[in-house]
Image (cartoon, rainbow, N blue to C red):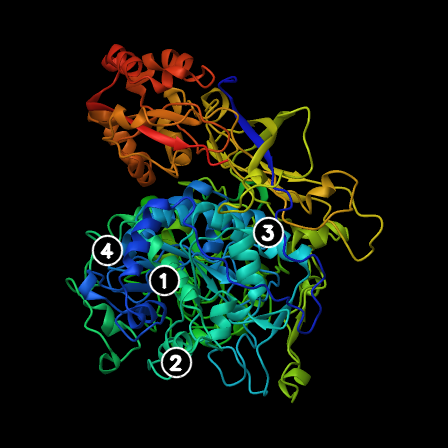
Amino acid sequence: MLSSPSKSLLVAAATLLASGNAQNTSYYTTYGGSPPVYPSPNATGIGWEAAFAKASNFVSQLTLEEKVRLVTGTPGPCVGNIGPVYRLGFNGICLQDGPLAIREADYASVFPAGLTVAASWDKNLAHVRGADMAAEFKGKGSHVALGPVAGPLGRSGYGGRNWEGFSPDPYLTGELFAETIMGIEETGVQACGKHYIGNEQETQRNPSGGFIGGTNSPAEAVSSNIDDRTMHEVYLWPFANAVHAGVSSIMCSYNRINGSYGCENSKTLNGLLKEELGFQGYVVSDWLATHSGVPSIKAGLDMDMPGGIGFLDSAPSYFGGNVSTAVNNGSLELSRLDDMALRIMTPYYRLGQDSGYPPIDASSGGLNFFPVSNYLYNFTYGPASVDVRDDHAKEIRAAGAAGIVLLKNVNNTLPLKAPKNIGVYGNDAGDLINGLYSLSGLALSVYGYEYGVLGAGGGSGTGRFTYIVNPLDAIKIRAAQDDSLVQYVLNNTLIIGQDSLSPTYPTPPDVCLVFLKTWATEGSDRTSLLVDWNGTALVETVASTCANTVVITNSGGLNVLPFANNPNVTAILAAHLGGQETGNSIVDVLYGAVNPSGHLPYTIAKEESAYSFAPIANSTALLETTDVYAWQSDFTEHLLIDYRHFDYYNISVDYEFGFGLSYTTFSMSNLAITASSSSLTATAAPAKIAPGGNPGLWETVYTVTATVSNTGSVAGAAVPQLYLGLPQPTADLDDITPVKVLRGFEKIYLETGRRACTGGVIFDTWWHTSSCSERLTVNRSSAWGPSYVEIWPAYEYALLPPDCIDRSIQYCSFHARRRERCSLPLEHDMAAVETMDDDTDVIPTFSFEPSGPARERREESSPWARRQSGQVYLGAKKSATRTVLLWLFPEASALYQRIERYVLSPRSREMQNEETTRRLIDSYTQSFDMVAIAVSLIKVYNVD
């Protein structure tokens, strides 16, 4: 299936995820409408059997007090702490923030935000970022990373924490959410998907007088009122991906859902998460999100954090001694407590955290909020101030550039072509002047800090920078290569007030770079979608003098851009939140060292008022109410958020969802759709629930192929996007289906002309239907439920021609991503293979280390490539196993055609014959410039 050298073949297969064991099909009413679902389902360890057995043995030896200790947080050196049981060799569990860095740590990196990853549209990048962050968590002794984020999803553009997550599109978020989780957990760290569920605003997220987010009105937290279809097809969607990916824990949210608090909502915890999706891990509360003891436990909460009703003290507590009392008096069954303990310990054993795990960095406690005097236990510490940054700066820089979206580029203004006189303007261009850590009073204000580049948002999801590269310094370094003059004014008020570019001289510069920022933080929602610090007026002032004005935004969310059509604004870059290498990432794109490949993960409308369809619940009346249940947020827009709304109502926008320019051009052709069977059904057959739901919901039903070509003069990455449209309902006027929804994408690196990579790129994303499976037919008679269509590769290989390996490895090499869900150790012998059943593929894996020029090229081409050091994947998969990638270096060019014939033998039984495999490799080792070759076997289970 290799095409001509100037094209790259995209292969995808569609999978239907139909309705599966839904608990209740009624519309959730506005008040008190969350139906009860009891009892809380017991974990069975499906998919995690060995770890579950270890956990069962451990829990069977615990006393009642020790079981309670396991489910109740306690003061300690980490953000969250589970106390040790030293008599059984258990040192406790350390939980640390957050989604873009290990926050309470020194000598740690700050990565690009989830929003930036979403703008990259790169699943590989999400996976590697997750793995790299997890390596830092692990190095600091943290067992649990409190992230990634899929709640808030981004229903409202004003959401203060949208930047922590990915995109308001549930499919895009679901893909990147799952990839991040797999990256984290392959490193041996537990991922905690949060905040579950409907956590779509910060305003009144907590009851009055409660933790951050509550107002002064005597009221309960805001209730997100969501109907069943919207719940399944929008907000539950990414969490289904997370459970299917094997997430260890889920954090329940502060808000209420249909009248019931998120951490004691039996419908969402017992019914949707544990029963319908088959979640085998544990549910942990957000900090102080627990509002009861036994009721929360029976509703599905497994771990209470931080443990006490007050933030710093262990007592009083809704859990703790009250759980012991409830078990002793019979109001709580011991079997439920045992299930909680099993759910907590199973991921601990699954990821090997019981053996050789690094101890807690001794410096952690000094950075945290718990006074040492409040500790109840003696925790085990390792060395202090361990430097865990490794070489992650290179990957952070590349990831930040990948998430920059080129929105406008008149007459190829960018990339810059050695301008002699450069003007830099705006308070986002320079260095931080108030310190490197933003979690302070300013972090919870509307606009954050005035001077300094914005690399991360505020609140518990931020990071503690060890440094940040600001754009001005990066520009100076790059401009020196051209002997360019760099002038700058960073005071917005000064520029606007004097209505000129003075003291810039000569003026106007050849190019004027205007840097804008928009703060967003936990604890408050945004009050405007315009850029902060009067940035719009700043652009208009500069552009009135400078006919070549380039605008760069660092933002914690979407911005409307009134200056977008100003003729003197010749280019616009949306740079989002790039982490510690922000300035370098921006300069790489400005000067063309990196061809921009980001695409919008949201829509930019023409006017701010266009976003009123999904408002933040807030008003003077609510702030002054005496009705404790007054705060209600009715999701009356149903499925129509972001681009779905604009498409449905045919509203013109400035920049559509998925939009992004490049310094080259691409074309698409040869779209083909093939059904996997002539007897497809709309619903999956009943089956035993597995993580992710009914296994039949993930079966392949269609294959979609297309050809993408680089038709320009510069190498670059395209992002083909696959959308699905379904018929509109005819009977229920309140039931609206989006015009089209995203159901597939892949990032493809292509050389220009005949140097394009061929055959090496595949769709390996999930393609979910827009509504209940019945909408694939005209019949609407049966119950609502989640329904997915999943894109998988038709061939499980990616074969890259030798002339473009070096340029392609950054974008292609991680399709393998070590994603085998159940793998034998590399040293495993054939004796174990003989015990495998016929439903198993055995894929030879060739471990190697290239030497000489090949190694140097690999390391120069991409720091991400080093994550795959030593592994070449060959093989073909069965229907739901993970992707297999072959990537080799130019020295191996003589091997390509011969291995290609071998790999393309459909489901070759030779792949299960070790002796045949060894003979094949022995015949061709002369083609490799490598130090050593070893053959091993990996068992890949058919997870269908």
Residue that numbered label 1 is attached to:
341
**Where residue 915 sits: x, y (%)?**
27, 14
Residue that numbered label 3 is attached to:
169
Instruction: Answer whether labels 4 and 2 touch (C-beta < 8 Å).
Output: no
Q: How crowded is mark 3: few (under 14 residues within 10 Å), some or many (20 or more)?
A: many
Badge 4 amino acid: Gly
Q: Earlier in the sequence, mark 2 or mark 1?
A: 2
Residue that numbered label 4 is attached to:
139
- Could you give the CA–CA distance between mark 4 and mark 3, rounded to whole angstroms? 33 Å
Q: Nearer the viewer, mark 4 or mark 2?
A: 2
- Could you give the CA–CA distance between mark 4 and mark 2, rounded to whole angstroms? 31 Å
Q: Which of marks 2 and 3 is nearer the N terminus?
A: 3
**Where residue 748 sits: x, y (%)?**
49, 33
Q: Which numbered tag is attached to residue 317?
A: 2
Q: Quadrant of residue 490?
A: bottom left
Q: Earlier in the sequence, mark 4 or mark 1?
A: 4
The secondary element bearing badge 4 is classed as: helix
